[in-house]
Image: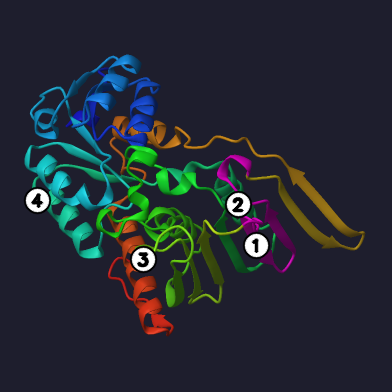
């Protein structure tokens, strides 16, 4: 197993060289202990661009990459609709997997991928990179410290208005697949995996009820460009999760209410999140703490901790059970939107 080696670099190939594929190539190349050995794309332009930026072999087809014996781990960075078939092919080739989020189009597809990996005795994880965002980690530390007292309300939002959202990934505005249903587009598939994953890490109780609404109002008639969901947890914590590319005036990124304080973070585009503000009441009145955030969009934290876990033989940072719970929630959000009702959340992985 690659993770048992303490000194050799771990060879990784990136399957798909669109915008996110380029991000993975850069992050892998910048992480000592990991080696970008190959990439693949049917686009001659993207192969040439990659070859100019990275010292690796770039193949015309994904099948050629899967035959490269130097590739121990494959990053599946295609459009979402192609995650499952290429993940299964990589597993069949004996490769370990890092899959872009969302892992697949449906909960059932995700289950199939992880079951196949287990059956072939290969490892599979998902690139939930926003666990390492500065804003989330600050919120996580604050809640763990008890500074806010008994937390009972959390609001987590991505709200912006930017034509670049639909062009993020693949070949950008040449192929704005995030605005197309057949490719697995939409803001729920784009931001839901991040925001839901973060909430499951913050709230230490089972999710019981989901009410949600999806909108397709400005950017595409095929997929959603705005969604909100109200989540009620068994411990009494209620959570609002919202993502929208339709806000001309951004809402807060975070608002967390506890019995002894409130935490607030400025929202908008991720590169502008912050500052953090915590206000507490005391005998001396209101006390306020402010902190700026480092703007580390698409942080390298995932690959650092991924390598650390491999070297130590520990579980990978993002586990299949965690991913499946998020996928089940995305599915429940769609079902609630379709029915117009709040629904119970049932997931065997919870």
How far apart marks 1 and 4 lie (CA) works out to 42 Å
Bin the neighbour count of mark 4 within 10 Å (Cα to Cα): few under 14, some 14-19, many 20 and up. few
The residue singled out by tag 3 in the image is: 330
Tell me, what colour scheme is on the image?
rainbow
Q: Which residue is mark 2?
A: 139
Relative to 122, 318 lies left or right: right
Residue visible at 22% across and 48% down?
A: 83
Of labels 3 and 2, earlier in sequence is 2
Say which of marks 1 and 4 sits in front: 1
Q: Secondary structure at mark 4?
A: helix
Horizontal and vertical percent position of residue 74: 21, 35
259 is within the stretch colored magenta: yes
Between the C-alphas of marks 3 and 2, the distance is 23 Å
In this view, the residue in front, 204 or 20, is 20
Marks 2 and 4, how far apart in space?
Answer: 38 Å
Q: Residues within 10 Å of mark 2 (few under 14, many from 20)?
A: some
Q: Earlier in the sequence, mark 3 or mark 4?
A: 4
Which residue has dot 1 on it? 256
Report the quarter where the C terminus lies: bottom left
Above or below 227: residue 41: above
Determine the image quadrant of residue 219. bottom left
- Find the residue positioned furthest to the right: 284
Residue segment shown in magenta: 248-272
- Residue 185: x %, y % from top left: 34, 55
Q: Dots 1 and 4: beta carbons under 8 Å?
A: no
| Helix, strand or loop at mark 3 | helix
Q: Residue at x 69, y 56 (%)?
A: 264
The N terminus - image quarter: top left
Q: Earlier in the sequence, mark 1 or mark 2?
A: 2
């Amino acid at each position: 197993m690659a993770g048992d080696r303490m000194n050799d670099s771990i060879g990784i190939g990136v399957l798909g060289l669109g915008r996110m594929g380029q991000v993975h190539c850069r992050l892998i190349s910048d992480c000592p202990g990991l080696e970008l050995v190959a990439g693949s794309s049917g686009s001659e332009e993207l192969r040439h661009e990659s070859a100019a930026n990275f010292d690796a072999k770039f193949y015309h087809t994904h099948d050629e990459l899967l035959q490269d014996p130097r590739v121990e781990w494959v990053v599946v960075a295609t459009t979402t609709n192609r995650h499952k078939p290429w993940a299964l092919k990589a597993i069949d080739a004996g490769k370990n997997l890092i899959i872009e989020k969302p892992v697949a189009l449906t909960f059932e597809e995700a289950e199939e991928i992880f079951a196949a990996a287990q059956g072939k005795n290969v490892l599979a994880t998902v690139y939930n990179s926003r666990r390492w965002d500065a804003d989330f980690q600050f919120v996580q530390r604050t809640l763990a410290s008890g500074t806010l007292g008994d937390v009972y309300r959390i609001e987590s939002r991505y709200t912006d208005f930017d034509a670049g959202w639909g062009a993020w990934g693949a070949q950008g505005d040449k192929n704005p697949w995030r605005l197309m249903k057949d490719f697995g587009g939409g803001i729920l598939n784009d931001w839901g995996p991040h925001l839901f994953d973060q909430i499951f890490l913050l709230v230490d109780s089972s999710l019981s009820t989901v009410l949600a609404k999806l909108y397709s109002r400005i950017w595409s008639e095929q997929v959603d460009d705005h969604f909100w969901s109200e989540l009620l947890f068994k411990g009494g914590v209620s959570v609002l999760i919202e993502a929208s590319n339709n806000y001309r005036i951004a809402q807060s990124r975070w608002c967390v209410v506890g019995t002894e304080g409130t935490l607030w973070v400025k929202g908008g585009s991720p590169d502008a999140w912050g500052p953090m503000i915590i206000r507490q009441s005391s005998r001396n009145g209101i006390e306020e703490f402010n902190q700026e955030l480092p703007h580390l969009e698409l942080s390298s934290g995932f690959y650092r901790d991924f390598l650390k876990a491999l070297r130590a033989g520990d579980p990978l940072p993002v586990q299949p059970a965690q991913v499946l719970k998020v996928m089940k929630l995305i599915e429940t959000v769609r079902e609630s939107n379709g029915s117009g009702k709040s629904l119970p959340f049932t997931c065997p992985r919870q």
